[in-house]
Every structure is written in structure tokens, then in C-alpha cells.
Image (cartoon, rainbow, N blue to C red):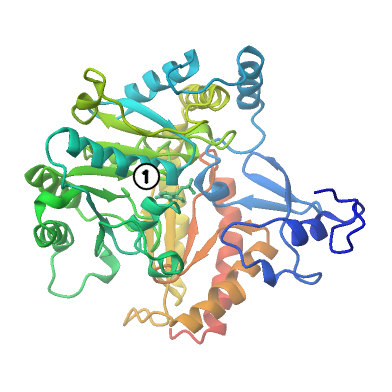
Amino acid sequence: MSTTTADPSKTTAGATLQEQARRHLWMHFTPMGEYSDENEIPIIVRGDGCYVWDEHGKRYLDGLASLFCTQLGHGRSDLVRAGYEQSKELGFFSSWSYTHPRAIELATRIADLAPGDLNRVFFTNSGSESVETAIKLARQYHRLTGHPNKYKVVAREIAYHGTTFGALSATGLPGYREPFEPLTPGAVHVPGPNMYRLPEGHSPLEWAEAVAKRIEFEGPDTVAAVIMEPVQNAGGCLLPPEGYFDRVREICDEYDVLLISDETICAWGRLGDWFGSTALGYQPDVITTAKGITSAYAPMGCVIASDRIAAPFMEGGTTFLHGSTWGGHPVAAAIALANIDAFENEHVLEHVRENEPHFRAMLESLRELPIVGDVRGMGYFWAIELVKDRETKETFNAKESEVLLRGFLSTEMFERGLICRSDDRGDPVVQLAPPLIAGPEQFDEIHAVLRPVLEEAGRRMNVRD
Ligand SMILES: Cc1ncc(COP(=O)(O)O)c(C=O)c1O
């Protein structure tokens, strides 16, 4: 359509970005109807390091690394240059029956970094696509190895695995699923670990046993895979208890079920290592990842499979019947290679490990505030759980959460120049995951915003001291 058409319902050429966005743009997971002249759409126009600027020139600390993606921060001309140089050499060629040097080099590099014998890399364009791919891979793997009825996936309640139908089926958030039912058959859920809310008298390893019980209940001959994040994002950086993944690994082996580690967020230094499973010391059969693989200078994701899982696909004329036009795009692959180079040359993993204690200490200091129930996370991936009463751990109900998170916290922190996440997909949390180049200066800035805002939130919500 033209924007200069005579149709009065069409936008005029002179409209501001705000007007054009309200009229034509469809933002993701965003209640578009809430925007107005008084309530503007935030339009971010520029970035540099850990900071971004909006259309009015106001600066914000990117405390969520633009949705856990901008590992090396904004404005990296080396990554841009890598994409530019690649575009000049070969702008695009697909991964269907052909390939190109950057996809081969990147696959080799990733296989080198990935844990154990995870040596086979299938490129995608997003986290959802990676999860979708892994679920299909698990199903076809079992067919090829003589178990055609193994198709179910065990995932965890509250976990988010993406929006495409397979990934959404694995997602354990009823509100996200309900509008799109019926979903892909075969996804079942178990409760995941939440050490802050471990019921009295129970062992944390019961959360691992729940996986075995579910597989038994479904029938082991029907279960293809278990999918879990190393540290679960939705619910607020939920860490596995000691021994959890060891036991889940044993269970997967016992029932011939693939362990898929969804590291869309937890790879690429977020937990202080290349991969979340490495940081936590467990061996998956398949890793799904995306986001930080290019530090967000191009969209890309990948699935990394072990030699054992890949083997049946590598024989004779067998094909993994799956793919996408853009998977392994040479420009994205060149940027991912430059990203890995920069991680190594600038010792980014070491930086995260060295600075994690400072980040942790700053956040832990907020435990003084009555509204702070728990502080948890690792690396540069942290959540603060907010409660009504610290003694009883009483949480806020849905209406109170709405008032607290969307009515106050999100807007107040944004007003004060901090972009982070206020989330109540589980219990209400504030989440922080800055670019991996952040250090004490940024931690101080985060603290200078968080402390007064959480103090005020406690007063407003009549939190008991
Ligand atoms: C664990 C996990 N899996 C999958 C996804 C979906 O990724 P994408 O939004 O790139 O499709 C996300 C997104 O945040 C995620 O956190």
C-alpha cells in the first residue's frame, strides 16, 4: 500500500513515527490499544555499549540486554563490518543441498565449544525455531532407530520455549497456550524446581523424580524427549537444585529419552560459560540456542546434536526432513564468527565470572527491603522475587501483581532510565540480565534505580516489614 493514497484511513506521509507505529506496526506480545498521545510507544533509536537512547534523546541502561541478546553491547562496528564484508563476498546462499564457508566454519567452531560429543550443528533463525527443530529431530530420530511411537515431550510448568506450535506446546504457561488450542499433541508438563518455595519436608530431588513419574505415566515407549532450560527464565531465574540434572540425565538414559537443553538464553556467556549446561555440569543430547550467538547483530539460532543422535541421519540417503530458507545465512554466520572471536579476544567469559560476585552482592543488598523475598540467579542472569510478607513468603494475587508490575514498577524504572523486566508469568519478579560487558559502574546505576523504586513499591503495596 502507499502512504500517500487518497483513502482517509491511510496514514499521511507527514505522520510522526509515533503516529505511524500506532497505525501500522504490530508489536510482539504488546497490547497495542494501550498507546495514545499521552502514553507513547517507546521508540529506541540508537545504542552504544550498555546504553540505548530513545527518539527524544533520553538514555537508558539496557538492563535486559535487549531480551537477553546483546551480549557484547550496542554499537560494535567489528560485528557490523564482518556482516558487511560477507555481504560483499556472498550475500546469501541457502543451506538446502548447498552450503558456504561461513556455515561450515561456524558449525566447526560451535562443535568445538559445545560440551562432549555435541558435534553436529543445524542452523535456524530464532529460539522458537530451534526448539521446533529439536522436537522434530527427536521424533524422527526415534522413528529411524525403530521406536516410531516415541513422540511425546516432557517439559516444565511455567517454562517458556517459544511461540511456534511445537515450541508453544512445550511451553508451560496456560495463558500463552489457551488462545491457540488445540496445540501439537504430545507435550506434557511437570513442576520444575523452585528452591524458594520448596514445600516443607520435601526433598528438592522430588522435582527430578517427577520427570520419571511422568514418563512412566505416559508410557516410556511414547516419550521422545525432555526439554528444560539450565536456569529457567519464566518464573524468575529458577536454578536447579544440586543433583537435579544428574538425576534427569539418568532418567533420560534409563528410558531412552533425549535430553534437550534449551539454551536460547543460557548460552553465549549468560551464565559465565559458552553453554549453560557446561556452566552447570551436565551433558545434554541436544542444545537449542539463539539470541546471543550473534550478540543480536543478525538473527540466528542453532540446534547442536550429539554424534549419537545425528548418526542415523548421516547414513545412506537418510534426510532430516526439515529446514528453512534463511537457516545458516552467510551474513549471520560471519557475524556469529566475529562474535565468538570477540568473546575470546576480550575475555568476555572471564569478565562475567570476575564480575558476577559484584553483581550478586549489589542485588543481595536489596534483601534489606521488606518487598524482596528472594534474590537468585547466576552469571549475568538474575531475578528478585517480590512478596507481600517475607516471613510467610505470601505472594501478590493477580490483581495486585498487575498494579505492582505494570501499574508501577515497569513504568517507574523506565522513567528513571533502567530497562529491565517486571514479570509475573510465575510469582512476581524483577529480572536483570545486562550486556556481558557491564561492570561495577552499571551495577551501581542499576542499584541507584532499583532501591528507591522497590522501597516505594513496598510502601504502595502495604508490604509488611
Ligand atoms: C528458553 C527460551 N526458548 C525459546 C525462546 C524463543 O526464542 P525466540 O523468541 O527467538 O523465538 C525463548 C525466548 O525468549 C526462550 O527464552
The image quarter in which residue 457 lies? bottom right
Q: Residues within 10 Å of mark 1 (few under 14, many from 20)?
A: many
Compare residues 330 and 76 and report the one nearer the observer: 330
Q: Which residue is mark 1?
A: 131
Please state the horizontal and vertical placement of residue 17, each as a whole percent of the image.
Answer: 81, 54
In the rendered view, does 146 fall on the left or right side of 273?
A: left
* Label 1, ligand 1: CB separation under 8 Å: yes
Residue at point 90% right, 56% down? 12
In the rendered view, does 464 fall on the left or right side of 440?
A: left
In the rendered view, does 61 fall on the left or right side of 188?
A: right
**Relative vertical location of residue 242 with respect to residue 124 in this rendering, above or below:** below
**Relative vertical location of residue 461 with respect to residue 205 in this rendering, above or below:** below
Compare residues 393 and 369 and report the one nearer the observer: 393
Report whether residue 307 is seen.
no
Image quadrant holding the C terminus, namely bottom left
Please state the horizontal and vertical placement of residue 323, each as a whole percent of the image.
Answer: 42, 32
Please state the horizontal and vertical placement of residue 19, each as a whole percent of the image.
Answer: 82, 60
Residue at point 14% right, 59% down? 218
Residue at point 85% right, 57% down? 11
Report whether residue 33 is seen.
yes
Residue at point 47% right, 56% down? 362
Give the SS element for disc 1.
helix
The image quarter in which residue 395 lies? bottom left
Please state the horizontal and vertical placement of residue 64, each as a whole percent of the image.
Answer: 54, 51
Q: How many marks?
A: 1
Under mark 1, the amino acid is Val
In the rendered view, does 59 fall on the left or right side of 126?
A: right
Compare residues 427 and 254 and report the one nearer the observer: 254
